[in-house]
Image (cartoon, helix red, strand yellow):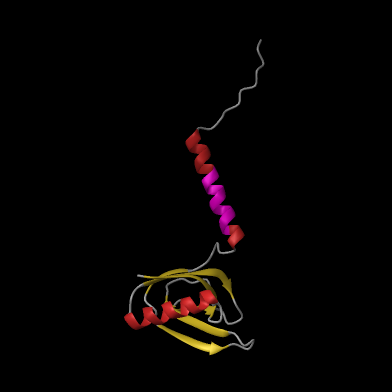
Amino acid sequence: MNHESVVSVPGKAAMKRGITALLIVATAIASGSAFATNYTGVIDHFSINAAANGMTRVSVYVPVAVATCGNAYMYAFEFSGDTGPGKAMLAAVLAAKASGESIVISGNGACDEYNIEVMLYFEGH
């Protein structure tokens, strides 16, 4: 009687799907944005003010149905207007609001003390 072990090896396609799924989960966990808000549409309004720590705080308000922070009617993303990327995003926000063009915003998935999510990505159309 032969008692060889039989090992089932998944096909390449199954392995590729498994590895892809693991990479997606690992990326979401590592980035901390597994529940980040993504918005495509127009900017309702924005505000620029000095935060208590002296940072130039830029808040962008957009209407969304479901958001990580805020409420179901209006949602805000924020970023510092003091950094190089922040200055570029501020210029893009001003241009998008002035033109009324559609934009894409992605946040980091974390709510700050003002119940606002930090904007990580901004794209104009």
Q: Nearer the viewer, residue 10 or 94?
A: 94
Query: Residue 86: horizontal and vertical position, in percent?
Result: 52, 77
Write down the region rendered in magenta. 19-28
Residue 57 left/right relative to 41? right
Residue 97 seen in the current view: yes
Q: Nearer the viewer, residue 71 or 119?
A: 119
Above or below 74: residue 66: above
Residue at 43% over, 70% down: 39
Residue 125 left/right relative to 53? left
Q: Nearer the viewer, residue 42 or 124?
A: 124
Residue at 52% over, 46% down: 20
Quick check: is 24 in the magenta stretch?
yes
Q: Nearer the viewer, residue 46 or 2?
A: 46
Residue 64 left/right relative to 70? left
Residue 69 seen in the current view: no
Residue at 55% over, 68% down: 109
Query: Residue 11: horizontal and vertical position, in percent?
Result: 50, 32
